[in-house]
């Protein structure tokens, strides 16, 4: 794994005068309440067309103890104006150049104060009971919970259900099962065990992190009570094959057998090509 750079802490960002930042700074929020503080992190850059829906879905959460953090990559399209217009509902935001999505996620992980963490993409959204359902789904035997994705195009229909794989643990050593990263809520203490995302992984840092967690006995639990509305990217084919390559690299490095990892890699490539040409 590439060595990640040192990231500023929450307090260091608060004291920095040369960084665009704002928010409510956890006003009225506390980690000492009877219920866990949940950090929701959204990373974005030039997301003015989609971010409004994402922010609104956070505002509508029924769970009463949420910290909302937005990490912006120095947007130039009006995204900052949108963030500022919702500043009363955002605990902390920063805007500065970064090294891409994985780097921005690591900033969020380092800054956040919650006992539980949820990554919500800038073009995705969740129902109002999502966080409440996530908190209720945790038990002593799991380190993270995950659910299902409804897939579609932003502003259009979300009509393809991607079910989470409750038996993911049987496959994760050599391929990416449906642990549906857009639905994962995990205990922050996992970062102490697994570390941050590997910034060398641009498409599948989530699998790399999960497989590193797997070899350190980090376990997850599936629940059908968690659903994220996930918007497809127009470059899905390009990212699919790059993601498969990263999954293969991480599997071979940390957990998988050479035979099983390469078998599933080739099989998924062939399946994707067949599906593509059948649809043409």
Image (spheres, rainbow, N blue to C red):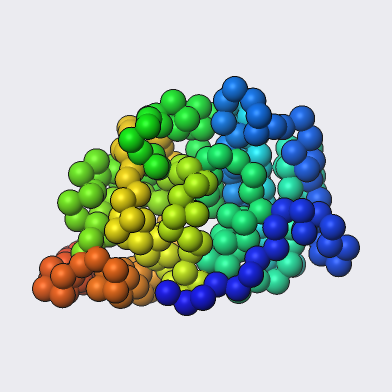
In the image: residue 71, left or right of residue 259? right
Residue 54 pos. (x, y %): 59, 44
Residue at image x 84%, y 57%?
15
Closer to the camera, 102 or 15? 15
* Quarter in which the C terminus is drawn: bottom left
Location of residue 30 by image quarter = top right
Residue 80 pos. (x, y %): 76, 56
Residue at image x 32%, y 38%?
221
Residue at the far right: name it: 17
In the image: residue 253, left or right of residue 189? left
Closer to the camera, 277 or 197? 197
In the image: residue 190, left or right of residue 246? right
Residue at image x 64%, y 44%?
113
Answer above or below: position of 210 versus 35.
below
Whether residue 276 appears in this view of the structure is no
* Quarter in which the N terminus is drawn: bottom left
Answer above or below: position of 95 versus 182.
below
Closer to the camera, 263 or 142? 142
In the image: residue 190, left or right of residue 52? left
Whether residue 217 appears in this view of the structure is yes
Closer to the camera, 53 or 41? 41
Answer above or below: position of 18 versus 49.
below
Residue 219 pos. (x, y %): 32, 45
Residue at image x 74%, y 48%?
92
Residue 251 pos. (x, y %): 27, 68
Q: How many labels does the image show?
A: 0
């Amino acid at each position: 794994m590439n060595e990640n750079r040192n990231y500023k802490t929450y307090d260091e960002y608060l004291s920095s005068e040369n960084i665009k930042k704002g928010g409510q700074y956890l006003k009225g929020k506390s980690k000492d309440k009877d219920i866990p503080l949940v950090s929701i992190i959204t990373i974005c850059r030039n997301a003015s067309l989609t971010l409004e829906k994402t922010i609104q879905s956070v505002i509508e959460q029924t769970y009463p103890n949420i910290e909302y953090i937005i990490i912006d990559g120095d947007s130039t399209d009006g995204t900052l104006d949108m963030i500022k217009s919702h500043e009363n509902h955002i605990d902390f935001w920063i805007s500065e150049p970064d090294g891409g999505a994985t780097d921005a996620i690591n900033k969020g992980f380092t800054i956040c104060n919650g006992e539980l963490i949820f990554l919500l993409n800038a073009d995705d959204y969740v129902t109002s009971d999502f966080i409440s359902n996530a908190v209720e789904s945790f038990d002593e035997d799991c380190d993270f919970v995950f659910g299902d994705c409804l897939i579609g195009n932003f502003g259009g229909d979300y009509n393809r259900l991607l079910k989470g794989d409750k038996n993911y643990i049987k496959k994760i050593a050599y391929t990416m099962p449906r642990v549906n990263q857009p639905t994962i809520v995990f205990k922050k203490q996992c970062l102490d065990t697994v570390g941050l995302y590997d910034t060398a992984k641009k498409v599948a840092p989530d699998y790399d992190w999960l497989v590193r967690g797997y070899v350190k006995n980090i376990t997850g639990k599936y629940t059908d009570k968690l659903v994220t509305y996930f918007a497809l990217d127009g470059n899905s084919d390009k990212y699919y094959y790059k993601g498969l390559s990263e999954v293969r690299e991480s599997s071979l490095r940390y957990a998988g057998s050479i035979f099983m990892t390469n078998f599933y890699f080739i099989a998924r490539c062939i399946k994707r090509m067949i599906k593509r040409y059948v649809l043409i």
